[in-house]
Image (cartoon, rainbow, N blue to C red):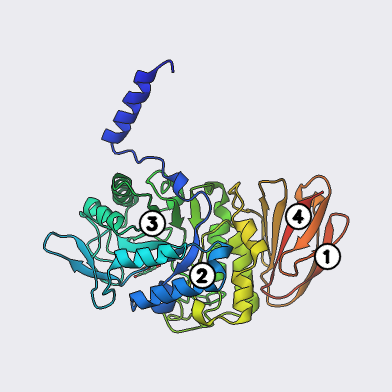
């Protein structure tokens, strides 16, 4: 190398001035897994986690790529005399490290949760001013992922950047590879700064409720409010840096819990399948939140659709681009690593509608086989498809280059 001195100086300056190390390698593909929040709220314990790990392994979810369990809010038992964070000993009597070992033995990684303020959203002990110490604690427990929330923190973006960067640096300094999930709900446009602050993913919206769409004036976002924000952010996503439109609500069916309160009335299976299609083509983290131990066949078929998951986990890491978003239709197009493409067409309206699509009109040159990823069959011909799409249904196609 011609200028080794310059490189060393740069690295030295970057370390001294707190520039976070490049953390994008930690999540080269959108993370997939299960998170406690929507089903359990803060009422969590180690047996729930063990049971979910068991059924994720036995039910084929691990094999399909769901490789994280995220413990959300409610695990904390305060700090010990040395200010080390401890788990609630009645809920986690064996401790988090033993739980991590159990989960790891199933081929699953373990995530945990904290907040960039003195208290979390549900009022538990959080990490402000204890970043280094807490990151070391999480690393010593063999934690693989941290969801870092923003309740009780100041509104401005500058403080958010400082607080998130501080925790990202602490995670790096812990010496363990810990994926950092930024959760400030999109208010400070994290797509502009969260990757630089050390995040591998960042929530783009408020908490998902178990509903298709909010009624005018109603509190809480459904699938459609989230999609309307997240679908326009494709240019910010890429390998190691993902827009996170929150958990999958597939299979919740209006169950009690955080996503069911405040108007979360449940969705139809068609709507749940649409969420999966849209999250797959948007290269969104696929974080299930339903009761994996009691899934019906339809939920299982939705969550375990390998062909849809392949679109999500495509190595090129593109988020599907929004081609059209009008009153009735949302159309997203995603280019894939091998030259294929994925196409999603959502009928947003309240009634079935006929439509047709020509791949040439979408700018796709050459010849393609159009494969319907829910029918698992080839459809259409001569680079054209036409058919009927049900209300709130999403057609998800793989366009296979001939
Ligand atoms: C916030 C987050 C949720 C969840 C709760 C926990 O609302 O956005 O995803 O983590 O806090 O209290």
Q: Describe residue 173's horizontal placement relative to residue 25 as left or right.
A: left
Marks 2 and 1 close (CB-CB < 8 Å)? no
Q: Describe residue 227's horizontal placement relative to residue 46 as left or right.
A: right
| Residue ID for mark 4 | 399
The answer to whether one can see residue 288 in this image is yes
| Quarter of the displayed picture in which ligand 1 can be seen | bottom left
Give the spatial CA distance, label 2 vs label 3. 18 Å
Q: Earlier in the sequence, mark 2 or mark 1?
A: 2
The answer to whether one can see residue 220 in this image is no
Along the viewing direction, whichever of 30 and 353 lies nearer the viewer: 30
Q: Earlier in the sequence, mark 4 or mark 1?
A: 1
Mark sitting on residue 386: 1
| Residue ID for mark 3 | 144
Q: Earlier in the sequence, mark 4 or mark 3?
A: 3
Give the spatial CA distance, label 2 vs label 4. 31 Å
Give the spatial CA distance, label 4 vs label 1. 14 Å
């Amino acid at each position: 190398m011609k200028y080794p001195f310059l490189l060393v100086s740069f690295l030295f300056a970057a370390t001294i001035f707190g520039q976070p190390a490049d953390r994008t390698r930690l999540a080269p593909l959108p993370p997939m897994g299960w998170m406690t929040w929507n089903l359990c709220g803060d009422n969590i314990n180690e047996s729930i986690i063990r049971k979910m790990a068991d059924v994720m392994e036995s039910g084929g979810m691990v094999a399909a790529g769901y490789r994280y369990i995220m413990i959300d809010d409610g695990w904390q038992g305060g700090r010990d005399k040395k200010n080390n964070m401890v788990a609630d000993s009645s809920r986690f009597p064996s401790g988090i490290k033993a739980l991590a070992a159990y989960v790891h033995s199933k081929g699953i990684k373990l995530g945990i949760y904290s907040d960039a303020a003195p208290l979390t959203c549900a009022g538990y002990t959080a990490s402000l001013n204890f970043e280094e110490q807490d990151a070391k604690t999480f690393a010593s427990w063999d934690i693989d992922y941290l969801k870092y929330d923003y309740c009780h923190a100041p509104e401005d973006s500058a403080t958010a950047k400082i607080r998130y960067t501080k925790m990202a640096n602490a995670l790096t300094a812990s010496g363990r590879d810990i994926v950092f999930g930024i959760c400030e709900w999109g208010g400070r446009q994290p797509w502009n700064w969260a990757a630089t602050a050390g995040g591998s993913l960042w929530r783009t919206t408020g908490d998902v409720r178990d509903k298709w769409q909010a009624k005018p004036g109603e509190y809480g976002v459904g699938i459609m409010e989230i999609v309307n924000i997240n679908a326009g952010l494709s240019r910010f996503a890429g390998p190691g840096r993902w827009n996170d439109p929150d958990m999958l609500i597939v299979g919740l069916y209006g169950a009690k819990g955080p996503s069911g309160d405040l108007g979360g009335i449940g969705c139809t299976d068609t709507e749940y399948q649409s969420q999966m299609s849209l999250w797959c083509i948007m290269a969104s983290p696929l974080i299930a939140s339903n009761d994996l131990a009691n899934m019906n066949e339809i939920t299982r078929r939705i969550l375990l659709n390998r062909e849809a998951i392949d679109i999500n986990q495509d190595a090129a890491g593109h988020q599907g681009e929004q081609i059209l978003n009008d009153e009735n239709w949302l159309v997203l197009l995603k280019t894939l690593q091998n030259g294929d493409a994925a196409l999603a067409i959502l009928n947003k309206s309240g009634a079935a509608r006929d439509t047709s699509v020509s791949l040439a009109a979408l700018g796709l040159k050459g010849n393609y086989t159009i494969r319907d990823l829910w029918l698992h069959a080839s459809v259409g011909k001569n680079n054209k498809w036409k058919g009927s799409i049900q209300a709130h249904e999403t057609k998800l196609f793989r366009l296979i280059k001939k």
